[in-house]
Amino acid sequence: MLVKICTEQFDPWLEAQNYQNQQKAMIGKFGATSIFIGTMRDFNDGDAVKGMTLEHYPGMTEKQLEKIIAQAQQQWQLIDVLVVHRVGDILPNEPIVLTAVWTSHRGDAFDANRYIMEELKTKAPFWKKERLLSEHERWVLKNTDGYQP
């Protein structure tokens, strides 16, 4: 398991591939990998957004993400998990978060990955300040529902 907070832009596909290649204990063990990549949108709450600053609580953020993963491990048979989350200044279309779950079967991979992402959005200590096209800045008070139509 790895939780990684980064301040620079990252390539989520490369992160997942490199992690998988480095985990020799996983070779031949996993039959499913579920990957979620969250990217920054250029809109929110009906406004055009040109960027945001994502802040976190160092140390506490990682512990909370590890706790979320541990809870997922109690519910599903997971072989490994990778979470990479960006902080700092972010522009539209840049990746913000990667969650990757390796399991023996697809059901556990899909379900655990969804659980980790939804828990991350509601429980991990991250704060977003959006920069609107109008030059106004605002703190995001709540995350969008993962099941928006």
Image (cartoon, grey):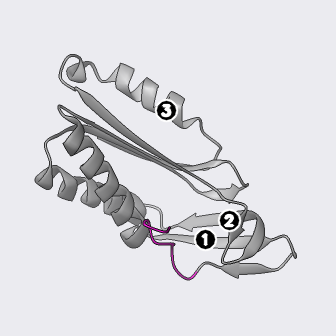
**Residues at badges 2 and 1 in contact (C-beta under 8 Å)?**
yes
- The residue at which mark 1 appears reads as 128
N-term mark: 3 or 2: 3
Task: Return the disc, 3 or 1, that comes first in the chain's sequence.
Answer: 3
**In the drawing, what numbered circle is on residue 71?**
none
Question: Would you name the residue on which mark 3 appears?
Answer: 15
User: What's drawn in magenta, residue-wise?
Assistant: 141-149
Amino acid on which the number 2 mark rests in the picture: Thr
Answer whether residue 146 is magenta in the image.
Answer: yes
How dense is the environment of label 1, judged by Cα within 10 Å: few (below 14), some, or many (20 and up)? some
From mark 3 to mark 1, how far is it between C-alphas? Answer: 23 Å
Image x and y of residue 52, in percent: 70, 65
Vertical placement of residue 42 versus 14, above or below = below
Q: Which residue is mark 2?
A: 53
Q: Is residue 136 left or right of residue 8?
A: right
* Label 3: element kind: helix
Badge 1 marks a residue whose secondary structure is strand
Residue 29's place in the image compared with 68, above or below, is above
Q: Which residue is painted at 32% across and 49% down in the image? A: 113
Q: Residues within 10 Å of mark 3 (few under 14, many from 20)?
A: some
Q: Residues within 10 Å of mark 2 (few under 14, many from 20)?
A: some
Cα distance between the residues tagged 3 and 2: 22 Å
86 and 136: which is toward the camera: 136
Task: Please tell me which of labels 2 and 1 falls first in the chain.
Answer: 2
Count of numbered tags: 3
- As for residue 136 lying within the magenta part, the answer is no
